[in-house]
Image (cartoon, rainbow, N blue to C red):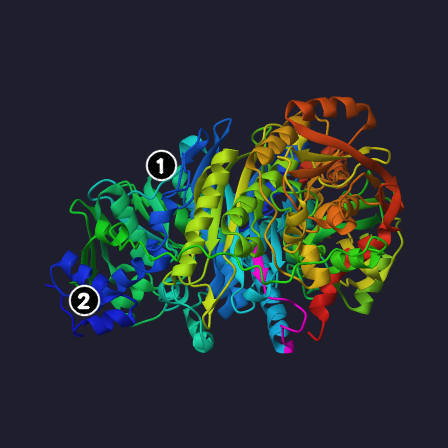
């Protein structure tokens, strides 16, 4: 019988975030009242963050298998076969709430957590990308001075935290994106994607095996930090008191993580390790119960042997601590010595704290007493699953004012400059310059030089391309279309580098799932992602759901972030976005879209664009219609052109439309400009700045033109010559009339310096 | 001729240096664990970049006490070639093998980007195959890279031609805007008076393949290889292969 001093009632359970029904289920599983420690274990493992109780029923609708997929969702990270005996191990995860409470440590430990998910599978991390969402940096009608100042502080802290952790650990931060919307003011999003490489026959899994095998604790000592980080911080809305939750944020030590990485990879090579899992959310509790459950075994641990940073820690505290940089592993019986020797070499604690048992229970002892004894499967897999109420689809109100197109004789040069300076469009060099994006000398396409980051695999001829994308504003207006655009843009970005998109990971950021309208968002967006991933042949191999992104009842835009992985068979075929040579032909590639009546649609679609927001201050309408067949055809076409070495540059059209895409291709090429002449019947603003999908700007050598047009035709892609790479003057004419004309250097100056200027306002 | 790359627990450019020397330049190369005092018969020692012991204190302040550093010191005192890159440079300063100290970058931010360097002297085994005034495009990646020393030391460095690399513009002019971290006299790399110990903040091992953006770092490694090849006679007596 498990002794317990406190009588555990439904009220106590409720304080731990368990509902009356959940508490009744706990009592049913145990056949008795839980001890306080057991209650703690259930409360974290059955929290939204760890159990996916609101999302599980929906996530089943995502495609998760494909010819490249070695491991789909359910392990620490997804695994994809990339050929030549190697696998890519990758996953994206959120660390939103901790980063709002304590930006530096929140972001730093977000990086640390996802890195451990990668190397716990036997893969060495080779790249990190960060998808970040913040509130506006400058005050406006709707943003107060202090709010803008806080947004700038959060951004600065988050960037420093990411830099500090990744740079010290020695993984290059190679990409990602940053967007700004008022809805992220009280709830920034920090989604971190990590990619690792392992030999296919050297992957490790978190499945305990072998009765009597020792369970070994390695890494940092356990302290009282981060207790209930997952269940309290990540699984509830925010209010005015959230700052008091700062002690729930963990503190990162990247040097310790680096030691853990090297020691784990070296220990794995001894062949003495059976299973291994990092202690992330819910620390010792999740790692022990999940390893036991996945292996169909039990685990017994003695807490007195757990290395502790503080004295007098209770069983409850040790089991729930989220101290960083710790791992739990199962070794072959009688081969512990080999494991210990490796960890001693790296100066790390490695202690046998228990053993694998055959009874399927997680049994926890302290001072010779059993303080918890629960079927492991019940904690890890039998958590509550909710089919939460879903609101009916809203009929979109058309009351919002839509953008009026500027009159035919308007000079758009000033608007163009203003757009280039807007934080969403402006260069992120200030950010990427603080990340070590070159360490490990694999970065073929660094941040800002291509549509996706490209890292080579030294052992092979291949390279991998990665992009993260997701437009919350579009999802807010149209759930399914917004989600499909996120997948399509990520895949298009990868294809622009010449890589074939093969698999994706997703981070789904939403408000409170107990609200039917939020579950409507979630359900529709999962369907949108599913449809797009099926159409593009890119299964989802894992990811993370982050609910409760609300403060004071106001939810963020529904924000799915897609991390897309692509394979380049020949790293030397990688294509950047910058123009290459004066005199090269500039072409607009466009997937063939069914002819449709655009007159009503144009203003609606344009009103949701970055231009409409930055120039007209109007955020309304709906995202552009999406045609997944056209997207797929464009992707296939880009991959074919790149593998034929016909592309000098390729850049997809997204935020800011054609004009911004052309300008960025100039900015990425020192000293080059573009002379463009468009033939169009559309209003000028629409032609220059609309953001519909399935389009890319490429440049090719004049002698390749015929071949490029021929290949494009094979894929039913329209390849229209729109101009020439020049020097000096950036100019766009429409039907022979000049619309935009400025020196490329002056435009670059605006674009490069803008973000820093925003951050210096009153900081 | 063999290179040794020292591995401190938090070195993270060790593999990059190893790759540059072993795979790109095809020279024999070996990792040397910090806890050993055996230089394994290496002819040139590389202290690579990274965060040797986390560098939560001063960069390099703990690394200088590693057993390998006593062996490196003996090796250097006998004329052996030692190059410290980034964190390796910081460690050489802390160990007293080079004069001066590092301050945090002037804007207090980590900086990772290409910079331009001017070769100030070719009278070192690390720049002997360069030409004076040659401009090298090589990346930096550091938080504490603002070189500092007192005026007497600076005068010594100048007088003895110990300033090997300076930050300049692409066309080779000294310019405050081209000095990324606020280093005194735009110093990017210095050698000791005997000219066999060299530290530089930029990463030449990241600039050895054109496909990654630059191969200007090759000249540093070619110079070392060339210098070793021309000193084979001296070589034998320099080897420190076991703890003394």
Asked if residue A333 shows in the view, the reply is no
Q: Give yes or no for contact between labels 2 and 1 (Cβ–Cβ under 8 Å).
A: no
State the residue at coordinates (78%, 49%): A684
Residue stretch rendered in magenta on the structure:
A131-145
Mark 2 or 1, closer to the camera: 2
Percent position (x, y) of residue B97? 69, 56
Q: Is residue A659 magenta?
A: no
Magenta-drawn stretch contains A133:
yes
Tell me if residue B224 can be seen: yes
Left or right: residue A452 versus residue B67 is right
Number of the label disc, if any, that sits on residue A271: 1
Q: Secondary structure at mark 1?
A: loop
**Side of A212 where B208 appears, left or right:** right
Front residue (pair A210, B54): A210
At 50% from the left and 51% from the top, the residue drawn is: A479
Upstream in the sequence, badge 2 or badge 1? 2
Q: Which x, y percent locates residue B116?
A: 80, 49
Is residue A694 placed above or below B94 in the rendered structure? above
- Dot 1 surroundings within 10 Å: few (below 14), some, or many (20 or more)? some
Question: Which chain is home to disc 1?
Answer: A
In the rendered image, residue A399, in percent from the top left (x then y), is placed at 58, 63
Side of A316 where B106 appears, left or right: right
Badge 2 sits on which subunit? A
Q: Are marks 2 and 1 on the same chain?
A: yes
Check the image and report above or below for A694 versus A557.
above
Rendered position, A163 above or below A316: above
Circle on res. A35: 2
């Amino acid at each position: 019988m498990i002794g317990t001093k406190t009588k555990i009632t439904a009220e106590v359970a409720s304080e731990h975030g368990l509902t009356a029904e959940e508490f009744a289920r706990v009592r049913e599983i145990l056949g008795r009242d839980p001890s306080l420690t057991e209650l703690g274990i259930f409360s974290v493992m059955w929290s939204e963050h760890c159990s996916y109780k609101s999302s599980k029923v929906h996530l089943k609708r995502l495609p998760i298998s494909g010819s490249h997929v070695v491991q789909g969702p359910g392990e620490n990270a997804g695994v994809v076969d990339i050929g030549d005996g190697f696998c890519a191990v990758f996953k994206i995860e959120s660390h939103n709430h901790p980063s709002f409470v304590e930006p530096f440590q929140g972001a730093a430990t977000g990086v640390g957590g996802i890195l451990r998910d990668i190397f716990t599978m036997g893969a060495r991390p080779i790249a990190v990308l960060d998808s970040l969402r913040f509130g506006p940096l400058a005050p406006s009608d709707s943003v107060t001075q202090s709010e803008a100042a806080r947004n700038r502080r959060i951004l600065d802290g988050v960037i420093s935290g990411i830099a500090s952790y990744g740079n010290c650990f020695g993984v290059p931060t190679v990409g990602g994106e940053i967007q700004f919307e008022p809805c992220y003011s009280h709830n920034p999003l920090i989604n971190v994607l990590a990619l690792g490489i392992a030999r296919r026959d050297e992957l490790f899994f978190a499945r305990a095996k072998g009765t009597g095998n020792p369970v070994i604790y390695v890494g940092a000592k356990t302290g009282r930090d981060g207790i209930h980080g997952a269940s309290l911080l990540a699984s509830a809305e925010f209010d005015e008191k959230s700052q008091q939750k700062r002690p729930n944020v963990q503190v990162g030590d990247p040097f310790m993580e680096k030691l853990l990485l090297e020691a784990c990879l070296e220990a794995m090579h001894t062949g003495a390790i059976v299973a291994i899992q990092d202690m992330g959310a819910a620390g010792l509790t999740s790692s022990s119960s999940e390893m036991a459950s996945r292996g169909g075994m039990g685990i017994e641990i003695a807490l007195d042997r757990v290395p502790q940073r503080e004295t007098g820690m209770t069983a409850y505290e040790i089991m729930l601590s989220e101290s960083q940089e710790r791992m739990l592993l199962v070794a072959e019986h009688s081969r512990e010595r080999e494991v210990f020797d490796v960890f001693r070499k790296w100066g790390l604690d490695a202690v046998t704290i228990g053993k694998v048992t055959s009874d399927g229970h997680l049994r926890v002892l302290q001072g010779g007493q059993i303080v918890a004894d629960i079927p492991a499967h019940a904690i890890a897999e039998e958590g509550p699953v909710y089919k939460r109420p879903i609101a009916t689809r809203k009929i979109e109100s058309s009351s919002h004012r839509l953008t009026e197109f500027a009159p035919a004789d308007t000079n758009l040069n000033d608007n163009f400059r203003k757009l280039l300076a807007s934080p969403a469009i402006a260069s992120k060099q200030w950010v990427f310059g603080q990340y070590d994006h070159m360490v490990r000398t694999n970065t073929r396409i660094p941040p800002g030089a291509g549509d996706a980051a490209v890292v080579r695999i030294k052992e092979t001829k291949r390279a991998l391309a990665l992009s993260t994308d997701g437009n919350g504003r579009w999802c807010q207006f149209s759930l399914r279309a917004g989600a499909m655009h996120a997948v399509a843009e990520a895949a298009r970005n990868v294809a622009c580098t010449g890589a074939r998109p093969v698999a994706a990971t997703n981070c789904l950021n939403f408000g409170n799932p107990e609200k039917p309208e939020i579950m409507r968002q979630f359900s529709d967006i999962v369907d949108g992602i599913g449809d797009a991933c099926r159409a593009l042949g890119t299964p989802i191999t894992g990811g993370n759901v982050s609910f409760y992104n609300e403060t004071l009842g106001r939810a963020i835009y529904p924000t799915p972030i897609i991390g897309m992985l692509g394979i380049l068979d020949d790293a030397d075929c990688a294509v950047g976005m910058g123009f290459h040579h004066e005199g090269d032909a500039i072409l607009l590639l466009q997937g063939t879209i069914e002819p449709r009546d655009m007159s009503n649609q144009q203003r609606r679609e344009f009103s949701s664009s970055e231009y409409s927001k930055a120039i007209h201050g109007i955020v309304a309408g709906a995202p552009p219609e999406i045609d997944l067949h056209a997207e797929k055809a464009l992707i296939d076409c880009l991959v074919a052109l790149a593998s034929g070495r016909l592309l000098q540059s390729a850049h997809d059209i997204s935020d800011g439309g054609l004009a911004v895409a052309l300008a960025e291709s100039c900015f990425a090429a020192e000293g080059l400009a573009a002379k463009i002449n468009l033939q169009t019947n559309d209003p000028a603003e629409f032609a220059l700045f609309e953001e519909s999908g399935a389009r890319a700007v490429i440049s090719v050598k004049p002698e390749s033109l015929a071949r490029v047009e021929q290949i494009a035709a094979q894929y039913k892609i329209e390849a229209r010559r729109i101009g020439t790479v020049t020097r000096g003057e950036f100019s766009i004419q429409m039907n022979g009339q000049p619309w935009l004309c400025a020196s490329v250097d002056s435009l670059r100056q605006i674009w490069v310096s803008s973000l820093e200027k925003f951050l210096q306002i009153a900081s | 001729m063999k290179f040794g790359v020292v591995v401190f627990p938090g070195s993270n450019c060790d593999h990059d240096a190893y790759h540059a020397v072993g795979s790109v330049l095809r020279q024999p190369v070996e990792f040397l664990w910090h806890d050993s005092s055996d230089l394994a018969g290496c002819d040139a020692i590389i202290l690579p970049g990274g965060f040797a012991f986390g560098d939560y204190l001063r960069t390099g302040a703990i690394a200088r006490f590693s057993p390998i550093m006593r062996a490196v010191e003996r090796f250097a005192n006998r004329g052996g070639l030692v190059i410290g890159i980034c964190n390796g440079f910081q460690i050489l300063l802390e160990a007293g093998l080079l004069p001066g100290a590092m301050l945090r970058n002037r804007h207090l931010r980590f900086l990772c980007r290409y910079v331009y360097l001017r070769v100030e002297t070719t009278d070192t085994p690390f720049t002997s195959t360069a030409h004076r005034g040659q401009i090298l495009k090589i990346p930096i990646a550091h938080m504490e890279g603002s070189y500092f020393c007192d005026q007497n030391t600076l005068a010594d460095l100048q007088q003895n031609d110990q300033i090997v690399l300076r930050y300049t513009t692409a066309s080779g002019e000294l310019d405050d805007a081209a000095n990324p971290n606020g280093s005194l006299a735009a110093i990017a790399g210095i050698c000791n008076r005997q000219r066999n110990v060299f530290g530089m903040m930029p990463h030449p091992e990241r600039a050895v393949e054109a496909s990654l953006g630059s191969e200007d770092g090759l000249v540093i490694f070619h110079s070392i290889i060339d210098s070793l090849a021309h000193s084979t006679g001296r070589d034998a007596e320099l080897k420190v292969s076991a703890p003394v």
